[in-house]
Image (cartoon, helix red, strand yellow):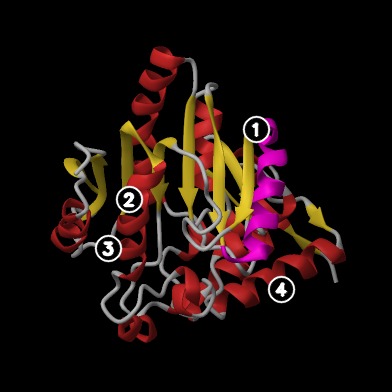
Amino acid sequence: MTVTLGEIVARSRRRLTESGIADAAREARLLIGGLLEIDATAFITGEGRILSADDASRVDDAIRRRTDREPIFRILGRRPFLRLVLELSPETLEPRPDTELLVERLVPVARETVARQGRCRVLDLGTGTGAILLALADMVPGVSGIGTDIARGALETAARNADLNGVADRVTFLESDWFSRIDSRFDVIVSNPPYIAAPVIETLADEVRRFDPRRALDGGADGLDAYRSIAAGAREHLEKDGTLALEIGFDQRHSVSALMEAEGFLFEDALRDLGGNDRVLVFSAGPKR
């Protein structure tokens, strides 16, 4: 039995709606467009297009996975991030728009550093897909650096993403537990570390709790374990005029700031996300104690 594009869009939208997915129409088009490489115009002009049995089966399987709450971009295997397209894997957190805010805050820092000294060295702790380091390298040609992670699968994904986005010649990925295998200094140290308090994880949405890797979420009993490790090791690896930037949980501004300031870092800036929550903290190295 043949099916047209218009028919499968309607069928997919209905299945998503019945399963309780909000904005089912948009999600159906996003999934189908990503799977079949169909742009927005084609959904309007190509409603009568007959799909192959294989394409129809792929769409139906993707919709089934979405009704089971698997996130759209995990189903597609890739997601956009600023000017990049990033592959995802089971060992990587799916980059969110909040992290784009962190990158955008660092772009002028990196540009000023390159203008001043010809380069900007970045250390991205807990790199995951490589999103932060790769986006900075893409947006500021003088950026190079290292991304670290404890998950080998994440490092392999980040390396593929570097190749995919044309910046592999300026970045390296290293298996390291925070600073354990780092022996140099950087102009920028940045991290989107695990910051969810362990008891809270089971209350998260299915899309996060079931599909993001737990160790990319779990910040320990109070959500601050990673920040303690970063605070303890960052000074030794940050240039004297360097910048430390961190993504945080919505209620962690004061606790994370206190950890960093106790190690001599000076608070510079805080940014809020689109929901009005504190999301990014920026510090300078401060005088050596």
Mark 2, residue position: 246
- State whether the magenta stretch is mostly helix, strand or loop: helix
Amino acid carrying label 2: it is Leu
- Please tell me which of labels 1 and 2 falls first in the chain: 1
- Please tell me which of labels 4 and 3 falls first in the chain: 4
Quarter of the rendering containing residue 73: bottom right
Please name the residue shown 55% across and 48% down the image: 147
Mark 4, residue position: 61
Indicate the secondary structure of the residue bearing disc 3: loop
Question: Residue 152 bears which disc, if any?
Answer: none
Please name the residue shown 69% across and 36% down the image: 168
Look at discs 3 and 2 and give the one toward the viewer.
Answer: 2
State how far apart marks 4 and 1 are (Cα). 34 Å
Viewer-closest of 212 and 263: 263
- Please tell me which of labels 4 and 1 falls first in the chain: 4
Q: Is residue 71 above or below residue 68?
A: above
Quarter of the rendering containing residue 46: top right
State how far apart marks 2 and 4 are (Cα). 38 Å
Location of the C terminus (image quadrant):
top left
Question: Residue 249 bears which disc, if any?
Answer: 3
Look at discs 4 and 1 and give the one toward the viewer.
Answer: 1
Q: Is residue 114 above or below residue 218?
A: above
Location of the N terminus (image quadrant):
bottom right
State how far apart marks 1 and 2 are (Cα). 23 Å
Does 95 appear in magenta? no
Indicate the secondary structure of the residue bearing disc 2: strand
Q: Residue furthest front?
A: 289
Chain part drawn in magenta: 150-170
Question: Residue 167 bears which disc, if any?
Answer: 1
Percent position of residue 122, x then y? 47, 37
Amino acid carrying label 3: it is Gly
